[in-house]
Image: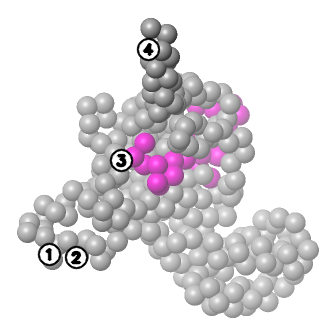
Amino acid sequence: MKQEDDISTRIAEALERLAPAKLLAPDFDAADAFIWNIAPDQLVPVTSVKHVDIKLLQAIDQMRDILSQNTQQFANGFPANNALLWGARGMGKSALIKALHAIIRTPENRALALIEIHREDISSLPRLLNHIRNTKRRVILFCDDLSFDNDDSSYKSLKAVLEGGILGRPENVIFYATSNRRHLMPRPIIENERSTATAPAESVEEKVSLSDRFGLWLGFHSCAQDDYLAMIDGYLDYYNIEGDKEIFQIQALEWAKTRGARSGRVAWQFIQDLAGRHKITL
């Protein structure tokens, strides 16, 4: 009898080890931003979110105003849309989301929380929603650089969260994603499926329609030279970097040539190099 009890105990312990760890109730008073980690599931508080002053985000005025209005509506408890920020690299897509959160979430109004979920953890979205569905806070779920490959089925979890499913998206949750791809899939894969599938429209529709479930599509495009130089001037003024602006602009253009692109990210990288050479702390 004792031997049977020992066997039962060992089996129970083994099953307990195999079972997924239960997530303790998230403490939404611990911070205004969190990172969702899995294995085990947990919301890790981020006490200080690294963000840029929204005034430094140049050449994206229209997208900034649209997303700002949408975010403010949501934070105030009114209907708002999920948003897909797509387009050129380094043009401030993720920076804009974090900057708006920093502006709208104030010490007096901490209703708006930001939760970042990694692209590889998208399949865990339903579990995450179960833990934040009943919080009184308004939550922006944020996924940076979202995209899917041809054999990736995790997009189905996101699709259900955005619009479908019995429970649907909780009223206190909105989903913002950034991507370099408008349809979240590489164009060659889309074209290949269209040309080789027995029923091309049906084969492609399920994956391409994912982006249609975002109420807002905001396109970010490579900036012109004047916009790039305006970014440089904005940084110079913001950080009180003294010197000949014309020389700095010439250097910034040369810097962009070595990178093969003009963008907000390239402008910031130049400013960091300039500040380092002049022994300036940013």
Is 251 displayed left or right of 183 in the figure?
right
Cα–Cα span, label 1 and label 4: 59 Å
Q: Quadrant of the C terminus?
A: bottom right
Residue 100 tag number:
none
Classify 255 as above or below 221. below
Q: Which residue is mark 2?
A: 192
Q: Amino acid under label 3?
A: Leu
Label 1 or label 4, whichever lies nearer to me, is: 4
Q: CA gap, disc 4 to disc 3?
A: 46 Å
Q: Which residue is depicted at the point 69% across and 91% down?
A: 254
Image vertical order of residue 187 relative to residue 124, above or below: below
Q: CA distance from mark 1 to mark 2?
A: 6 Å
In three-dimensional space, the C-alpha distance between marks 3 and 1, rounded to whole angstroms, equals: 26 Å
Q: Nearer the viewer, mark 4 or mark 3?
A: 4
Q: Position of residue 186 (x, y in %)?
A: 34, 71
Q: Which residue is mark 3?
A: 158
Looking at the rendering, which quadrant does residue 212 occupy?
bottom left
226 vs 236: above or below = below
Which numbered circle lies on residue 196? Answer: 1
* Tally of numbered discs: 4
- The magenta span reads 99-124
- The amino acid type of the residue labelled 1 equals Thr
Left or right of 34: which side holds 5?
A: left
Q: Secondary structure at mark 4?
A: helix
Residue occupying the point 67% across, 76% down: 267
> In the image, what residue type sits under mark 2?
Asn
State which quadrant residue 198 falls in.
bottom left
User: Would residue 268 be seen by someone viewing this image from the given angle?
Assistant: yes
- Dot 3, how many residues are within 10 Å of its Cα: few (below 14), some (14-19), or many (20+)? some
Residue corresponding to mark 4: 4
